[in-house]
Image (spheres, rainbow, N blue to C red):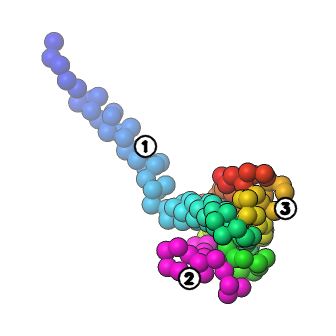
């Protein structure tokens, strides 16, 4: 008996691979899905950085998310609109640490909370907000007491 594939088996495999490629490839070329995930990751990183700055500098650091302008920022005072010029410095370039959502990505609601010098969020409750993009909502949650961001 000869080993290997018959022509029929080869054609069937190629058809199956083609159908799977048609279903999966558009997902890889949709920029909005990458933008939404990237902005979600930036929001997580900013919140974690804000907590670390609050502990290191022994001061309150506010995380502000403005749904009207789709902007998130870190400041030393409550600034729901992210318009304050005296924000926390971005470690990458030394400018105000503020990010605007890419086109097609929005914030589900405005929120503002602070991290205390102990790293605890204020108000003393779990804080969450959503980032909407690519047909799904990714939720950023800051746990009470510990300030754990996920």
Compared with residue 144, is residue 95 higher up or lower down, i.e. above or below? Answer: below
Horizontally, is 79 left or right of 98 in the view? right
Q: CA distance from mark 2 to mark 3?
A: 27 Å
- Does the magenta run of residues contain 143? no
Span of residues in magenta: 84-102
Query: Is residue 45 toward the left or the right of residue 124 in the image?
Result: left
Residue at the far top: name it: 1
Q: CA distance from mark 1 to mark 2?
A: 46 Å
| First in sequence: mark 1 vs mark 2 | 1
Quadrant of the image occupied by residue 69:
bottom right
Corner quadrant of residue 77: bottom right
Label placed on residue 123: 3
For mark 2, give the secondary structure: loop
Q: Give coordinates of residue 145: x percent, y percent.
A: 78, 51
Residue 100, located in which quarter of the rendered image?
bottom right
Q: Is residue 120 visible?
A: yes
């Amino acid at each position: 008996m000869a080993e290997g594939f018959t022509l029929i088996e080869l054609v069937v495999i190629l058809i199956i691979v083609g159908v799977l490629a048609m279903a999966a490839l558009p997902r890889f070329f949709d920029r909005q899905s990458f933008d939404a995930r990237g902005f979600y990751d930036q929001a997580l990183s900013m919140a974690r950085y804000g907590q670390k700055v609050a502990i290191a500098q022994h001061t309150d650091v506010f995380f502000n998310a403005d749904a009207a302008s789709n902007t998130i920022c870190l400041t030393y005072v409550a600034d729901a609109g992210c318009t304050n010029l005296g924000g926390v410095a971005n470690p990458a370039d030394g400018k105000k640490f503020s990010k605007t959502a890419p086109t097609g990505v929005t914030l589900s609601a405005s929120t503002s909370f602070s991290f205390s010098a102990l790293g605890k969020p204020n108000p003393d409750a779990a804080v969450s907000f959503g980032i909407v993009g690519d047909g799904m909502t990714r939720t950023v949650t800051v746990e009470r007491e510990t300030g754990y961001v996920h």
